[in-house]
């Protein structure tokens, strides 16, 4: 029998013959390994086992991906521009604001003003025309896939990445999976759990201009239960006068695994925040009186108080036997905003209670022998309560507006189909129902316009999406997509931001058709992405100053639907490993370039003028040395071209280039680290952000926010 088998084996092809012998060899090794026995023993086998030493069992395990690596892998399947920010990398320097978290991200413009959370943030020109301190618009923000953003936009007190493991950035319609159809896309913060941040962590930061931040976190796993708690305290006196900012917050995350198929998560965030606002100033003041607050800042009581914002969310996921998944989530957001509470003429009190609901189902099938991944989703955000009370200093009402029952509903259907090896077709469509209710219930100033005082706007829109991605290698791909975005106005925009507007404006959704192409991935010493896009925008929501500020009152601004505009640009990021030796020392160069070209299409008043608010060219670069012992140091540069301040393009903020440096050490076992981060080494006087205005008529106008001067920031972190 053995001879017949051996003869048959020799007649097989060489490759199969080798594989067969290898299989037999591995099988023999397993049979001879300790603890593995044949059912029957014979004298021959006893003799063989005595003469042949037993082999130990060899266990081969694949390296488990971290949550950050898994997120990167998943976003690589999106045929468009995406990126992931690892909070561990951000923690190697200052972690003061969203500007620190989202640095070195192509296409993302974020600038902090006054050292508080009220940063100016824009992706692909979204919300570029709003000022720092306003609710964020044009980008959907989420915690673990649950919305922060509601019909009123996004309050900014939670946008500081406290207790966050990593941050996903999905530009434009690439945030389709989250029901985020805004021009800028979506940003989702994924919180730490007991699995990702076990034990006790203490961190303290301190630096120039009275900056200090302390945080304490505790996480762990007990059987099927995991927990994570984080508390932080923040204070910054600020570079400019009248720019004190302080806040305290709590983050909690509790998870429970009922079975391998069913798991649930409960998340909680609380934040108490206060800040003064030094307000925009003139270019002359930026150059010669940089640290002075605006002449009207203190007298008008500019600033804000968040006496205690609460966000709570819950998410449950069930995995079926065929590996399809059903997820159900809900979140509740309650936030009271006291804007300019010390104003002698016009404080305002905002009270919002938002409820969100998320339902998602995803599965994988075979369609004509090809892999097909389908997903269904429903997302809803609604004002349970939304009201603004603009008052006199004695809190007597001047205008009271009710925005309750406004909502955004999004029904989405998507599919990824593998056409051939390496080539995937992505398709999807969303049905968007926008409802806005604005009722001026009380106003001392009579409505003498033709606009009504009570409006309910309810409209449906479709947002299709089609994309292709081709994988040259598992690590490198090219992509292209065509999509439509829907940006509904924030509910409060319908009645403006002051008692001087006792009516409701007729606003509609901003819609854009976008084409995007690019590449992303890694090859050799390079890792990066390149995306080119062009958006044809209709009814763009532009926020402009209607009434200029006075010595006793802040400026009055309002949103309007504009004539057609174009948003186009280039988003490029490249990490290059310039040098590396066998011991693990390396020098890397990180570079990011963004080209922003946003302009009118033959507007009757402004022709083809550039839209104000964002520099056309932005470059960031960092040269970093790392030693395997944990030591690192580097230098960095940030450069931006001039920025249009008004729609008439008669006044510009000048270009600037800033230099910085850092040095730090992280213990190889990760139980402690220390860093020094130096900003604006040359003490450059520059404009970090602008407040767009209608027409400056070529005059130096108080619409500029000075950037911070030279500053040094130390951070120490210890883990137990």
Image (cartoon, rainbow, N blue to C red):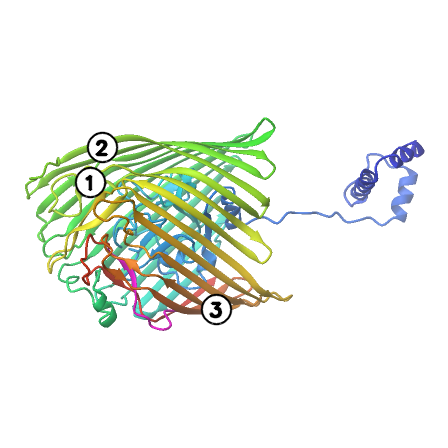
Query: Could one spot residue 171 in this view of the protein?
Result: no
Which residue sits at x=13%, y=38%?
Answer: 440
According to the picture, the residue beneath numbered tag 1 turns out to be: 494
- Counting from the top left corner in percent of width and height, residue 308 is at 26, 50
Could you give the CA–CA distance between mark 3 and mark 1, rounded to whole angstroms?
Answer: 48 Å
Residue occupying the point 18% across, 64% down: 294
Q: Which residue is mark 2?
A: 457
* Side of 229 relative to 50 (left or right): left
Report crowding for label 1: few under 14, some 14 to 19, many 20 or more residues within 10 A (C-alpha): many
Q: For marks 2 and 1, give the CA distance.
A: 10 Å
In primary-sequence order, the first of circles 3 and 1 is: 1
Please check the rendered image and state whether residue 130 is part of the magenta-colored stretch, yes or no: no
Q: Position of residue 34 (x, y in %)?
A: 78, 45
Q: Nearer the viewer, residue 682 or 314?
A: 682
In the image, residue 512 sits, relative to residue 101, either above or below, namely above
Q: Magenta residues?
A: 678-691
């Amino acid at each position: 029998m053995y001879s017949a088998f051996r003869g048959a084996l020799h007649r097989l092809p060489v490759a199969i013959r080798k594989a067969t012998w290898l299989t037999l060899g591995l099988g023999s090794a397993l049979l001879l390994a300790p603890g593995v026995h044949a059912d029957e023993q014979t004298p021959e086998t006893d003799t063989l086992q005595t003469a042949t030493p037993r082999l130990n069992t060899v266990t081969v395990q694949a390296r488990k991906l971290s949550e950050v690596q898994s997120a990167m892998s998943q976003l690589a399947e999106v045929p468009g521009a995406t990126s992931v920010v690892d909070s561990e990398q951000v923690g190697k320097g200052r972690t003061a604001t969203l500007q620190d978290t989202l640095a070195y991200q192509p296409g993302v413009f974020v600038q902090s003003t006054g050292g508080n959370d009220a940063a100016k943030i824009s992706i692909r020109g979204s919300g570029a025309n709003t000022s720092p301190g306003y609710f964020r618009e044009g980008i959907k923000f989420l915690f673990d896939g649950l919305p922060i953003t509601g019909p009123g936009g996004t309050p900014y007190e939670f946008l500081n990445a406290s207790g966050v493991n990593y941050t996903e950035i999905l530009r434009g319609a690439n945030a389709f999976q989250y029901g985020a159809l805004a021009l800028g896309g979506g940003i989702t913060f994924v919180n730490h759990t007991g699995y990702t941040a076990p034990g006790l962590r203490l961190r303290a930061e301190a630096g120039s201009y009275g900056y200090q931040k302390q945080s304490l976190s505790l996480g762990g796993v007990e059987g099927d239960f995991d927990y994570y708690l984080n508390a932080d305290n923040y204070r910054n006196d600020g570079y400019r006068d009248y720019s004190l900012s302080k806040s305290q917050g709590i983050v909690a995350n509790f998870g429970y695994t009922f079975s391998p198929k069913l798991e649930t998560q409960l998340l909680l965030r609380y934040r108490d925040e206060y800040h003064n606002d030094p307000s925009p100033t003139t270019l002359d003041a930026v150059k010669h009186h940089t640290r002075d607050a605006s002449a009207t800042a203190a007298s008008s009581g500019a600033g804000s108080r968040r006496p205690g914002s609460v966000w709570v969310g819950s998410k449950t996921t069930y995995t079926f036997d065929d590996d399809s998944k059903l997820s159900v989530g809900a979140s509740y957001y309650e936030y009271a905003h006291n804007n300019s509470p010390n104003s002698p003429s016009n404080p305002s009190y905002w009270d919002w209670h938002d409820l969100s609901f998320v339902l998602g189902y995803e599965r994988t099938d075979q369609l004509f022998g090809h892999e097909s991944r389908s997903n269904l989703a429903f997302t809803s955000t609604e004002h349970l309560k939304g009201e603004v009370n603009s008052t006199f200093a004695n809190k007597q009402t001047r205008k009271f507006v009710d925005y309750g029952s406004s909502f955004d509903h999004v029904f989405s259907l998507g599919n990824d189909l593998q056409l051939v090896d390496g080539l995937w077709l992505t398709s999807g469509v969303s049905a968007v129902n926008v409802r806005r209710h604005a009722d001026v219930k009380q106003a001392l100033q009579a409505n003498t316009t033709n606009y009504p005082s009570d409006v309910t706007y309810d409209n449906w829109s479709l947002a299709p999406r089609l994309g292709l991605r081709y994988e040259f290698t598992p690590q490198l791909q090219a992509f292209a997509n065509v999509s439509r975005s829907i940006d509904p106005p924030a509910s409060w925009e319908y009645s403006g931001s002051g008692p001087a507007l006792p009516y409701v404006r007729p606003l509609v959704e901003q819609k854009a058709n976008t084409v995007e192409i690019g590449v992303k991935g890694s090859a050799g010493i390079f890792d990066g992405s390149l995306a080119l896009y062009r958006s044809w925008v209709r009814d763009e929501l532009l926020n402009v100053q209607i009434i200029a500020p006075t010595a006793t009152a802040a400026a009055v601004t309002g949103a309007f639907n504009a004539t057609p505009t174009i948003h186009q640009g280039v988003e490029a990021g490249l990490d290059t490993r310039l040098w590396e030796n066998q011991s693990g020392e390396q020098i890397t160069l990180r570079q990011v370039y963004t080209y922003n070209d946003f302009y009118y299409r033959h507007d009757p008043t402004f022709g083809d003028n550039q839209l104000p608010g964002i520099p056309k060219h932005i470059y960031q670069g960092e040269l970093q040395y790392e030693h395997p012992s944990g030591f690192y140091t580097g230098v960095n540069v940030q450069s931006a071209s001039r920025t249009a301040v008004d729609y008439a393009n008669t006044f510009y903020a000048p270009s600037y280039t800033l230099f910085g440096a850092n040095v730090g050490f992280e213990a190889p076992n990760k139980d402690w680290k220390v860093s020094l981060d130096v900003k604006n080494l040359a003490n450059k006087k520059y404009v970090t952000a602008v407040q767009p205005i209608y027409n400056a008529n070529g005059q130096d106008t108080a619409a500029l926010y000075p950037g911070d001067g030279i500053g040094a920031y130390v951070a120490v972190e210890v883990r137990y």
